[in-house]
Image (cartoon, grey):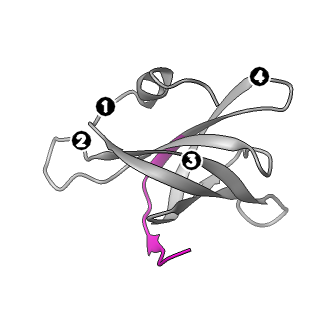
């Protein structure tokens, strides 16, 4: 929903498997909107899984980290196949986070899904 903007930025995510195990992955955002993101990655959550995502926005100043967007949402589309990149789309609710070099540290402050 809403306009999507092409944004290539590092992204980290985690989700809980149906068996209860916590999984983490990383990739690159392809595009974002106010309510969603598409992440290109090797490991994808299952369709319908609750996900937590951090996207590191580019910095506008040299030698500084850019802002991070932290969001919780649901994987609404999963793409895996031969000859094309794997990835997933998630519908998200975003929050702006203070920059940190360790995205897992931000996620560890949050309760697992």
Left or right: 65 as drawn, with respect to 46: left
Check whether the beta carbons of the residues at disc 4 and disc 1 lie within 8 A of each other. no
**Residue marked by disc 4:** 21
In the foreground, 27 or 91: 91
Q: Secondary structure at mark 3?
A: strand
**Residue marked by disc 1:** 100
Give me the C-alpha separation between circle 2 and circle 3: 18 Å
The mark that comes first in sequence, 4 or 1, is 4
Q: Residue at x 77, y 50 (%)?
A: 48
Q: Is residue 18 above or below residue 94?
A: above
Q: Would residue 54 be counted in the magenta stretch?
A: no
**Residue marked by disc 2:** 65
Give me the C-alpha separation between circle 3 and circle 1: 17 Å
Check whether the beta carbons of the residues at disc 1 and disc 2 lie within 8 A of each other. yes
- Residue 74 position, x and y percent, is 66, 50
**Label 1 CA crowd tier, 10 Å (few <14, some 14–19, many 20+):** some
Give me the C-alpha separation between circle 4 and circle 2: 31 Å
Q: Which mark is residue 27?
A: 3
Q: Secondary structure at mark 1?
A: loop
| Dot in front, 3 or 1 | 1
Give me the C-alpha separation between circle 1 and circle 2: 8 Å
Check whether the beta carbons of the residues at disc 4 and disc 2 lie within 8 A of each other. no
- Residue 102 position, x and y percent, is 39, 27
């Amino acid at each position: 929903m809403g306009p999507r903007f092409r944004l290539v930025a590092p992204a980290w995510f985690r989700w809980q498997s149906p068996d209860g195990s916590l999984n983490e992955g990383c990739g690159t955002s392809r595009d974002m909107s106010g309510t969603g993101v598409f992440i290109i990655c090797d490991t994808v959550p299952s369709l319908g899984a609750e996900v937590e995502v951090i996207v590191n926005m580019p910095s506008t100043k040299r030698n500084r980290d850019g802002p991070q967007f932290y969001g919780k949402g649901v994987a609404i589309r999963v793409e895996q196949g031969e000859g094309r990149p794997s990835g997933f789309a998630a519908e998200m609710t975003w929050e702006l986070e203070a920059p940190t070099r360790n995205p897992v540290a931000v996620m560890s402050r949050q309760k697992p899904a």
